[in-house]
Amino acid sequence: MQAINSLIFKLSAASLFSAVLLLPIMSFAHGDSSPDAVKKEVHVDKNLPLYEAINSSYLANIKPILEKKCFDCHSDSTRFPLYYKIPGFKQMIDYDIKKAKRHINMSKDFPFISHNTPLKDLESLREVVIENDMPPLRYVIAHWDSRLTKSEREAIIKWSEESISKLREFRYQ
Ligand code: HEC
């Protein structure tokens, strides 16, 4: 009896776990037909002095944080987890990465590769960090140390706000 009980427990834990993981996929299902799928990448001149200045503070203070906690999805250097090989997970992870990079690809530093302007990217970066929306919950479940700490969140918010005001002051986009 005990064996059966523990089996039932394991099964329900497993289905709860997969439900949590699959939920976002269902809500993303419309993804590929959404308008942002057809948006083109925005080309910016990375050599403009103000972008360069913002990038140098990015490299010093922000990139080390994002590298640890965001690059698996938002860059070309994903560290794939062991369960990537399990059917179902692979598709889910590939889909996430594709979608994440289509929004913001951080591989080439600031300005990010994106279909939005650098100013818009900073605004959405600030917002997701304030709202605690990133990394997504399904990723945090599998990588507990991927949550942003309080001081990391403060650093990103400060950097994005300072950069937003500089860009606005000089009427950059
Ligand atoms: C598990 C993959 C994954 C990780 C890890 C991840 N993201 Fe994302 N991110 C996504 C996806 C997918 C999207 C596309 C929007 C959506 O569907 O939720 C996205 C979108 C975004 C956006 C754009 C939001 C918008 O409104 O356009 C920002 C900014 C962002 N992520 C920042 C981050 C930051 C900062 C981190 C690290 C702290 C991070 N992400 C970690 C998957 C990820």
Image (cartoon, rainbow, N blue to C red):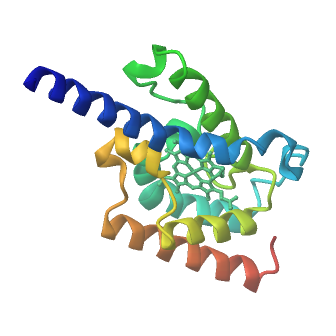
Q: Residue at x 61, y 37 (%)?
A: 96
Identify whether 135 is placed above or below 139. below
Vertical order, 38 against 13 (above or below): below
* x then y, percent, for residue 59: 49, 54
- Picture coordinates of residue 47 (x, y %)? 75, 55
- Snapshot quadrant of residue 25: top right
In the rendered image, the residue lying farthest to the front is 1
Q: Which is nearer the eye, 112 or 9?
A: 9
Q: Foreground residue, 98 or 52?
A: 98
Extreme residue in the left direction: 2
Q: Position of residue 79 (x, y in %)?
A: 45, 27
**Quadrant of the image for the N terminus?**
top left
In the rendered image, the quadrant that contains the C terminus is bottom right
Above or below — where is 30 with respect to 168? above
Residue 153 appears in the figure: yes
The residue positioned 34% from the left and 41% from the top of the image is 143
Residue at left 66%, top 83%? 165
Give the farthest residue toward the bottom: 169
Location of residue 121 by image quarter: bottom right
